[in-house]
Image: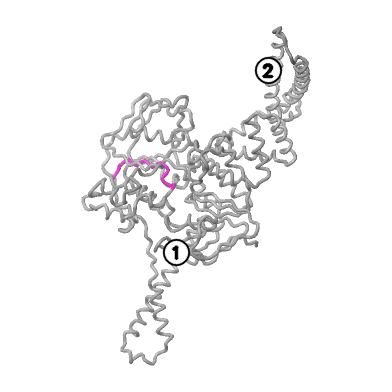
Amino acid sequence: MISYLQIENLTKSYGDRLLFGDVTFGINQGDKIGLIAKNGTGKTTLLRIIAGLESPDSGTVTFRSDLRVGYLDQTPAFDPEMTVLDACMVPDTPSAIIVAEYEKALLEGDQSRIEKSMQKMEAAGAWNYDERLRQLLTRFHITDMNARMGTLSGGQQKRVALARILLENPDMIILDEPTNHLDIDIIEWLENYLTRQNVTLLMVTHDRYFLDRVCNKIIEIDRQQTFSYDGNYDCYLRRRAERIEAMSAELAKVKNTLRKEQEWMRRQPQARAGKARYRIDAFYDLKERSKVNLREDNIAIGHIKSSYIGSKIFEAKNVNKRFGDKVILDGFTYTFARRERLGIIGANGVGKSTFIKMLQGVEPTDSGEWNVGETVRFGYYSQQGISFDDNKKVIDAVSEIADYIVIDDKHRYTPMQFLTHFLFSPADQQKYIHTLSGGEKARLHLAVTLMRRPNFLILDEPTNDLDIVTLGILEDYLEKFSGCLIVISHDRFFLDNIVDHLFVMEGNGNIKDFPGNYSEYRQWADERRKLEAENRDEKKSDTKSKPRQEKPRKLTFKERKELEQLTADIDSLTAEKKSLDELFASGKTLDNVAELSRRYDELTAELDEKELRWLELSEIE
């Protein structure tokens, strides 16, 4: 077994807060490891230390010599003026440099550089590199290689960063929340890719299906220490429960022994003067071991009840919405019922967020009626997060909303008391909002959303910044939630646990109402595709009696490029020849007629040659 990475006695603190201490573990070739911990306990910090972007307080990180490592940051940063092509190019890769030269020459239309670049591409065998780059970007729904990175959304930039890493084909990949901002189809493609590839992997993700299907090992950060579990996420859950149970039994045994030793220690000094020193030392060791705290600090939201909601929720009648040529809704009609749990899925850009903004009256409709019941009280958890002033303290921001949070007749909280249910200690509540981690901001956003006691919850990508433990608690809360619910999410596990039917937004205003959760929809879609493929095969079999024709040859990638360039060259040469024809026919006195005549002959010969080659290639196409 080949060792790729060895971490020894790694410790990291921020101020007086210890994230992890004396962490030691190794990664071997073929390991696919998921790193799990609650928000704020150092997952991202540990990855950044391993990637060399941060320094530990103590300890060492040792990679195998000449190991090629790819790292995906949680929020990749690019020069906004850089093109997608430049962002994907790895400076020290010869093939990447040659492909970049070729693509830029094509963009600028420099014939001389194009020809030289094509020769270099051929010599280096870089055509496959260029084709793989385009395939990866297309797979990630990035089609314009010359788009400036500053014009792309955060999700698009993350997809470009991910494509770059896969293009490098490193020995080991470190991924920080790779599924955030990805469509479900891209997540499933990436899941299959990482499962099939013989690549060593270390990643942080909250996507439980992704963890379960990709990982063969789980490392957990718990109480500033790491614990390793062989197997996938499902195995981890079982073995972690066994570990906690064993630790609880051991702690009970320690405390029982400590009580007996405490009686002995309380005797008069002269009564134990002749006792062995080792027993006194053992007592203090037991006392230290008994201080282990196995209590799980989790958010407490089970007692927060929704307000009353009437029989009329909302009705949509023939609603239409478009942005220019892009259709979001086309004659949409629907009546929402009590306790309905709806999931919305679809590719990025089809209008999922626009749909829920229209429901709340934030975005106007073009036409149609959208009637919301008088008792409906929306709670909106958006993927954009909270809109508080970053320079305010947590407690001040919440206090501005309400002096008291009334849950029901028996529960009435001050903002400080309410925030403790979301794991904000009195010290945490004095933090400025801009200093909070992504997970802490997500918890604050959730607290503000629920403090208003909504009876119609709208959750837009709630899983992006919430840790797995918090997601589980939120799922339990939503299961008992007596109001209505709409969830937009790419987290398949979350959708399967929460919703009872789906709106599948297919684009161009088409919405399919599917009666079931995501896994049931995926099974139905796979069966439909299989049936369609069988029908196509049957049609093909009906034509078998006809004489079999030889399958026509397709153009290679290089030939397609050549054909594109020939078309551009022929247009350019034809235009130049036409201008000379007009000049010769004008009757003007020409001082350089001999030179122009030679050029005319060169153009004619070059056009004949290129047009002949164009005809050859176009017949293949």
Q: Residue 490 in the image: x percent, y percent?
A: 47, 43
Q: Is residue 180 above or below residue 287?
A: above
Q: Is 377 in front, or is 603?
A: 603
Q: Is 250 in front, or is 132?
A: 132
Residue at 33%, 30% in the rendered image: 315
Residue position marked by numbered label 1 in the rendering: 224
Residue at 53%, 38% in the rendered image: 81
Could you tell which of marks 2 and 1 lies nearer the N-terminus? 1
Q: Quadrant of residue 354?
A: top left
Q: Is 390 in front, or is 584?
A: 584
Q: Quadrant of residue 355?
A: top left
Label total for image: 2
Q: Residue 349 in the image: x percent, y percent?
A: 47, 34
Report the span colored magenta: 453-464
Residue position marked by numbered label 2 in the rendering: 575
Secondary structure under tag 2 reads: helix
3D distance between C-alphas at marks 2 and 1: 72 Å
